[in-house]
Structure formats: C-alpha cells, structure tokens
Amino acid sequence: MVADGWRLPVARCEYLPEGLGAHHWLGWRDGPAGARTKPRPSWFISADQGERGRRAEAPYAAARALADAGLDFVLAPMRAMSGRVVVPFEDWMFSVTRYVPGRSGPGPFANDRERADVAALLGQLHSTPPPTGTPRPQPQTSWPDAEAALADLDRPWTGGPMGEAARALVRANAASVRVRIDDFARRTAELLPGDVPWVLSHGEPHTANVRWTDDGRVLLVDWDTLSVRPPESDLGAVLGTADGPEPARAYVAAGGVDRPLRPELLDLFDRAWDLAEIDSYLGQLHAPHPGNADDEHALADVRRYLEKR
C-alpha cells in the first residue's frame, strides 16, 4: 500500500503498539550492505479507520501546505503520488510522515525552557494565515458516545472484557458527567465565538506531539487537530503551566497575540479536552472491544477523567 501509493522503497515495517484509535508502523528502506549498525527508520506510517480517518484529511492537507510554505517546524504528512496526503484503502485512511530521530513525551514539560521552545513555535503558527481548507469547527457541545453510555447503564456491557468495569465507573460518576456536559454547553454558549480574532491552532501541543530532534531542532507533529480556534486552545498546555514569564515572552516575540490569557477560555478548553477523552474512551469500551493494551489504557484513562474534580 505505502510502496505503491507513495512510491517509497519500503523494505520492511515494524508495528508500533501505541496510540489510541489508529494503527502505526515504522518503515525502513534497504540498509547499506554489510552495515554494522541497525539503520534508523525512514517513515512513520499511520492508518485511521472510518470517519476519524476521513476527518484527518483536511487538517493534514493544511499542515502540508504550511510545511511547503516554509514553516520548518511543521512535520507534516507527505504527499502521495496522487497529490493527496491521506490515501484511502478499503475503510482505512493511510498517511506517511518522514521519520525524524529525537524524543517526545509523554509527561509534562520539564521546565520553562522547553515551554518557551514550543511557545515560540505557537507564536509563529498563530500569526500565520490559515491555508485554504483549514477546518473551522463549531464548538462541540454534543458528546454522543458518552450520552449513549449514560443511557445504557441498566444492562451489562457485554461487548468486551473491559465493559463491565467501565459501566461500574460510569454508574458511580453518572450525575457528575451529566453536570459536566450541561455546564460545558452553557459556558460554550456564553464564551464563544467571543470578540477576539481566532488563530491557526495546532490543538494538542502537549509533549507527545513535540519532537526534540537529535540535531537540535524542535518540531510539532500529529496535525489532525489543526484548525482555526481561539489562541487559548493551544496555550493552556504551554503558558498555563509556566513557572515564569519566559514562555509568554517567547510566544509574543515570535508573533503571538500580545494580551493576557483569558482564564475562562483556558478553563473551557481544559473541560473540552476532558469531555472529548471521556466520550472517546466510553465509545471504545461501550462497543465491542478485544481487551488489548489499548482497551486497558482506555479503562485507566476513563477512570482518571471520570474521577477528576
């Protein structure tokens, strides 16, 4: 699939059992004959299924346009021979990104130096005009998978081995989840769209989506959430946790919006993240599932988000 769609000399692939909702592989080209050291991968290959995969095409194409326009910190998917950055195969959507050696999260930023590195990239991004076709989503106030789970608490969840444990968690926290959903809808109506211009937003600039490369660069990866949003949608994860002023100064110096962050919007996007995670994980565990490592991760995280106060 990849060798044909992108005309890449893929000699072998290795499955990466990580990431939720998608499948990932590392791809190698032919190594030099007689090489004494294992060659580094050349490509990161991802496959998303169904609607999730189809939704990724517009933001991935916008990220590719940013990289082509010279934003060198945007590690975007490569164009296939067809010109698309996402290629369908049956019910799957494949993308290929150049592999860059380095390190990423998980975990919080280690210090304000790391936060400032990422804040400077966000300043450049927020001051860049959105490419044609960049999504501008309406604020989400519907959480269909969470609502379906809340409505189905009186009978066993028999779709997989984690179902009953997930149902017990939802039953114990049902009232809280309903309050959070209703409260979020009210706050969204009050605060958005607001009177401040929206910007080109990465959407999830946490450490797992930052690449500190072996040659000293800082890149942003995983662009499926790229869209036009308020600046606070990016800044809570970087400036909201800062110990001092350095990250905010780096953000403004790189072109970011020079004004105080709005705490009410930082809080709103924090709540949106929590609800999106709850919705996604409950959709996974309420439905048929095999009980693999992804499902174990989902159960642990849904517990953490449901019990968060």
Image (cartoon, rainbow, N blue to C red):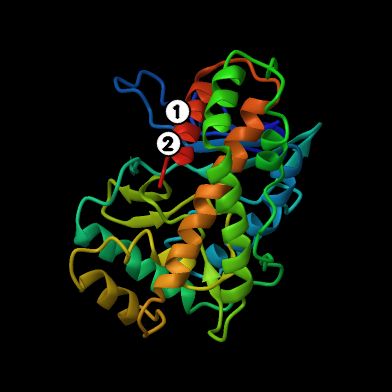
- Which class describes the residues within 10 Å of circle 1: few (<14), some (14-19), or many (20+)? few
The image quarter containing residue 146 is top right
Residue pointed to by mark 2: 304
- Quadrant where the N terminus is found in the figure: top right
Q: Which residue is rendered at x = 72% and y = 47% of the image?
A: 81
Element type where label 1 sits in the image: helix
Which of these two is toward me, 271 or 49?
271
- Amino acid under disc 2: Arg
Q: Nearer the viewer, residue 22 or 167?
A: 167
Say left or right for 166 vs 220. right
Residue 19, position as x, y percentages in the image: 51, 34
Q: Is residue 243 left or right of residue 273?
A: left
| Image side of residue 81 versus residue 37, left or right | right
Q: Position of residue 37 (x, y in %)?
A: 30, 23
Seen from the viewer's position, the closer of residues 308 and 6 is 308
> For this view, does 127 lie left or right of residue 34?
right
Where residue 296 appears, as percent x and y from the top left, is 49, 22
Q: Identify the residue at horizontal 61%, vertical 20% (top origin).
A: 163
Assign a secondary structure to mark 2.
helix
Q: Is residue 70 visible?
A: yes
Look at mark 1 in the image and give the residue it sits on: 300
Give neighbour class at mark 2: few <14, some 14-19, many 20+ (Cα, 10 Å): few
